[in-house]
Image (cartoon, rainbow, N blue to C red):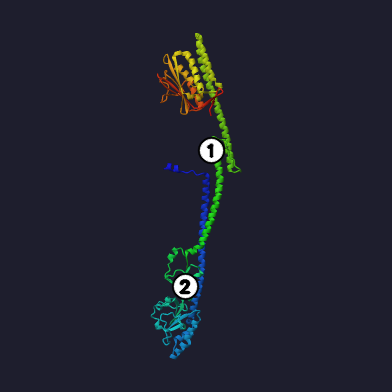
Amino acid sequence: MRGKFERIRVKVPFGYKLMISYCVFIIIPVLLVGNIATQIFVTSIREQTHNNIQGTLHQMNNNITYKIEDIVRISDMLYFDTLFNNRLRYTESQWVSYDTMVKVLIPKLETAISTANRKIWMSIYLKNNDLGEVYDNYSDSDPLDADKRLFDIYRYDRLVDKTWYKLYPPEEEYGTTLQWKQIEHDAAQGRISLLRRLIDITTIKLKEIGFMRINVSLDYLFESMDYKKIGEGTALYLSDSQGRIILSSGGVQTTVFREKELRNNGDLLIREPIPQLGWELIAVVPAPIVEKDTVKIRNLTLLICLVCIVVFFVVSLIVSRYFSLRVSKIVSVLDSFQEGEFHKRAHFKGNDEFSHISSALNEMGSNIGRLINEVYLADLQKKEAELESLHAQINPHFLYNTLSSISRLARFGMLDKLHRMVLDLAKFYRLSLNDGRNIISVKNELEQAQAYVDIQKIKYDERMQVSYDVEPEVVRYETVKLILQPFIENVLEHAWTGDSIHIRITAKVLQNVLEFRVIDNGVGFPPDRRLDNTGAQNLTNAGYGIRNVDQRIKLHYGSQYGVTLFSRAGIGTTVRIVIPLVKRKVSEGRDKPIP
């Protein structure tokens, strides 16, 4: 699982990380502030709308209350009228009753009705049976719409069986007990009645002497109830204590107020109670109207947030690109240092941290480059010195052995062989000197080995047999000089098993390397000499000449090249020499490398 995550891990450049971090730390606060501001604005607008509508409803309520109190004032004219009360209680004859009716009761009722600003209808129920009844037959019609008298006088026995009268408060409080209620046909005809007792005000005990009912139109009382005062698309409802709709203005006409449904729709509901009636005014502002201004605020806030985000994004892009370019330049210099190019430099204007980093980096690159050059030159000089030393060690060693042979030939008087040996020795050293260079063409290396073999044949004659297996293309390459002669010499010194020995010298191209082999059928390495599991000889305990060649090859070409020995006791030894393919060309008698 961990490997899977590592495979899908995406490398995000430093500039993008910086820009993303800027955007995250800028966009989130902007969106958060924008959202909070929007919520505050929306809440403020809803509260302001609520307060404005509440004020309008309160003004409507004041107008309604004024009209209600006006009707109550009309009832007070009869309730507190002493003459009116006395004439309702006392009668002595029919004439007095008639006089009371004509001169007191009817004029008082007409006066009270005439003081009203609008049409009202009044019904008086009297306990004094000596007083007659005065009424019209309205059937089911609205008496307020009839072109007739606006009051009726009934006897008390017409009242006692009415349900609404039985529900009227039994206890009377002087001057305050009254009731607004829709009774009989009021609801159907759009009216409401003020119900109030008429009492004997001359006694301490408030004794009922009659009952009055003042009927008034709802349209008159609630004339100020107009939804247009709140706004188009709104609605006003007049609701009783049971939630029934008494009157409505605008909106959907309904008989029951569905508050839960309206709130679920997000509509704004504002209530204004009318204590005198036990009813309340309810204003309904649909959610789209409430949110009309909030949508504008929300869109404006969103636009401001988007502008801020774009501005901040551009600024963060510029800033992140500024720092990203500087970091990229430093990383580029570090990559160059990693690849060994210590000449690359980073330069920044100003005196900030990047300038200090670049100065330190440039100084570090200069120091590292200088130290590497010093170490490289010292190592190169050391290798060249070691190579020169190894070459110097080989030449005297071979010269000592050859001069010993020449000395023996001279002692025995073999002048012809002595002459040939001296010529071959001169050829050998001519090729070995190679104008003072340690690199020689493969062709000359093979000729040098052959010159050495010719010298040794003079010494060993027919006992020594040498064969060559050389591919023609090997002459196109170069090699470190004196890599074959030491192994031929080693065979002649240590590999004899009888009177004769056979040496085979091969040279061929294998893929990207040049391989030489020196193969003999001599004694081989004894069992006590240490070999690896392939039969290859460990050169730690090898002879001086073998180690010399191996060290020179490794010093010049690298540790992957060098000498490997394969040997079996009684069978012989194979020396494998591997060097890289390096082409050379011949120009003016000298071998030069081909690019």
Q: Position of residue 387 (x, y in %)?
A: 53, 23
- At horizontal 42% and vertical 80% (from top left) the residue drawn is 141
Q: Does residue 491 appear anywhere in the picture?
A: yes
Q: Residues within 10 Å of mark 1 (few under 14, many from 20)?
A: some
Of tags 2 and 1, the one toward the viewer is 1
- At horizontal 51% and vertical 48% (from top left) the residue drawn is 20
Q: Tag 1 or tag 2, which sits nearer the N-term?
A: 2
Instruction: Establish if 287 lies above or below 589.
Output: below
Q: Position of residue 262 (x, y in %)?
A: 44, 65
Q: Which mark is residue 335?
A: 1
What secondary structure is found at the residue carrying circle 1?
helix
Q: Could you tell me the amino acid type at mark 2?
A: Pro
Q: Position of residue 59 (x, y in %)?
A: 52, 71
Q: Could you tell me the amino acid type at mark 1?
A: Asp
Comparing 221 with 285, the one in front is 285
Q: Quadrant of the N terminus?
A: top left
Q: Which residue is mark 2?
A: 275
Q: Position of residue 427 (x, y in %)?
A: 53, 17
Q: Does residue 93 appear anywhere in the picture?
A: no
